Image: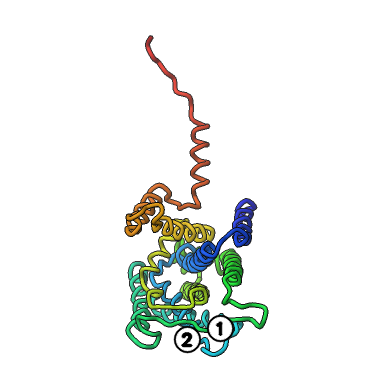
């Protein structure tokens, strides 16, 4: 990462760290939710942008992490973050291992459909059975703690903990993608057949990336369950998986910073079009405004929002290098 890009990332995280100083309760809750979605978008970016695997079932790992946080928590005492958080990530990772072991034997649209099928299976298990409270969902009665140092029942603590998790996930994926393992994933994304010809067995690499992605999604699910204190089957629906794909496309596929930008842009656009103060009665049709905005953004910004500075520089350079026109007007 260049110095300018690193500076922009540090500046963005610094701004998020200072945001609670000026934010109200609503703003704090909104940005906490966005950061959770940013972690979830980063997990999908590892697959789509890092490995070339378009997964349409990421919401399943997110939901499993959230349900594990609630179902593993006792109702009479606050659980410890030290064991509950890893347990949620492991639960999501185990399901990702099962899904990946089977779905990665397919390619292209078949892979997309198989991951969607597994996600829908998980959705209907919690939707149609009493395991997770059925359609009503279940509540988290005791929030996790870390002795007297950390109490995730407080909104400010949730915000700081979520920001710390976001920074940790971003740094981890950055190092991972720059490692030998990450280079192998990049090679698989560009040309898997050539990677096989050079002696790489690509299946274990893809499966490892799939499991890591699922574990990170489980982390996001844990954070979401703690924030809301409630989980329901909609957290595993294909609508969320589709929204995640839109986030990374909107931000710019192939860049971790793009996943962050896309998550913030998508959720803020949602809040904007839902605003009664801005759109009045039309706010109930917010899907229409959001959809049109995304279509226009994709059409005008093929590299996503992260490519806007480069597009501006190219246009300015093009104007600067443009030769003056020779006019032959007749008086």
Residue positioned most to the top? 331
| x then y, percent, for residue 39 | 52, 67
| x then y, percent, for residue 94 | 48, 82
Asked which secondary structure carries label 1, the reply is helix
Which residue is painted at 52% across and 32% down in the image? 320
Which residue is painted at 60% across and 69% down in the image? 156
| Image disc number at residue 194 | none
Residue 263 visible: yes
Give the tally of numbered discs: 2
Tell me if 76 is positioned left or right of 55 in this view: right
| x then y, percent, for residue 227 | 51, 73
Residue 185 visible: no
Between residue 135 and residue 103, name the one nearer to us: 135
Residue positioned most to the right? 149
Q: What colouring does the structure picture have? A: rainbow
Q: How far apart are marks 1 and 2 (CA)?
A: 10 Å
Q: Quadrant of the N terminus?
A: bottom right
Name the residue beneath numbered marker 1: 84
Q: In which quarter of the image is the C terminus?
A: top left
Q: In which quarter of the image is residue 232?
A: bottom left
Dot 2, how many residues are within 10 Å of its Cα: few (below 14), some (14-19), or many (20+)?
A: some
| x then y, percent, for residue 201 | 48, 73
Between residue 49 and residue 15, name the one nearer to us: 15
Name the residue beneath numbered marker 2: 71
Dot 1, how many residues are within 10 Å of its Cα: few (below 14), some (14-19), or many (20+)?
A: some
Which residue is painted at 53% across and 41% down in the image? 313
Asked which secondary structure carries label 2, the reply is helix
> Disc 1 or 2, which lies upstream in sequence?
2
Q: Tell me whether the residue at label 1 lies in contact with that at label 2, contact meaning CB atoms closer than 8 angstroms.
A: no
Q: Is residue 68 above or below residue 106?
A: below
């Amino acid at each position: 990462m260049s110095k300018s890009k690193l500076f922009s990332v540090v500046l963005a995280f610094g701004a998020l760290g200072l945001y609670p100083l000026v934010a109200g309760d609503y703003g704090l809750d909104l940005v906490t939710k966005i950061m959770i979605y940013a972690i979830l978008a980063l997990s999908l970016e590892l697959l789509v942008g890092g490995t070339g695997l378009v997964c349409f079932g990421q919401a399943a790992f997110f939901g499993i992490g959230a349900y594990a946080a609630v179902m593993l928590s006792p109702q009479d005492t606050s659980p410890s973050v030290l064991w509950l958080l890893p347990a949620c990530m492991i639960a999501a990772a185990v399901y990702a291992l099962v899904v990946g072991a089977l779905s990665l034997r397919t390619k292209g649209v078949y892979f997309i459909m198989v991951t969607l099928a597994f996600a829908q299976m998980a959705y209907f298990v919690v939707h149609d059975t009493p395991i997770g409270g059925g359609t009503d969902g279940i509540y988290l009665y005791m929030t996790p703690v870390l002795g007297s140092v950390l109490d995730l029942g407080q909104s400010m603590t949730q915000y700081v903990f979520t920001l710390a998790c976001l920074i940790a996930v971003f740094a981890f994926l950055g190092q991972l993608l720059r490692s030998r393992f990450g280079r192998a994933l990049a090679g698989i994304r560009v040309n898997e057949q050539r990677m096989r010809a050079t002696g790489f067995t690509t299946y274990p690499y893809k499966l490892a990336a799939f499991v890591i992605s699922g574990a990170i999604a489980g982390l996001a699910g844990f954070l979401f369950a703690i924030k809301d204190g409630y989980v329901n089957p909609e957290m595993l629906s294909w609508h969320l998986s589709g929204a995640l794909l839109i986030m990374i496309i909107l931000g710019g596929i192939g860049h971790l910073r793009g996943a962050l930008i896309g998550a913030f842009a998508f959720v803020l656009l949602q809040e904007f079009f839902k605003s009664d103060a801005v759109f009045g009665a039309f706010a109930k049709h917010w899907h229409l405004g959001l959809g049109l905005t995304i279509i226009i953004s994709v059409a005008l910004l093929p590299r996503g929002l992260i490519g806007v500075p480069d597009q501006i520089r190219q246009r300015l350079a093009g104007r600067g290098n443009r030769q003056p026109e020779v006019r032959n007007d007749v008086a």
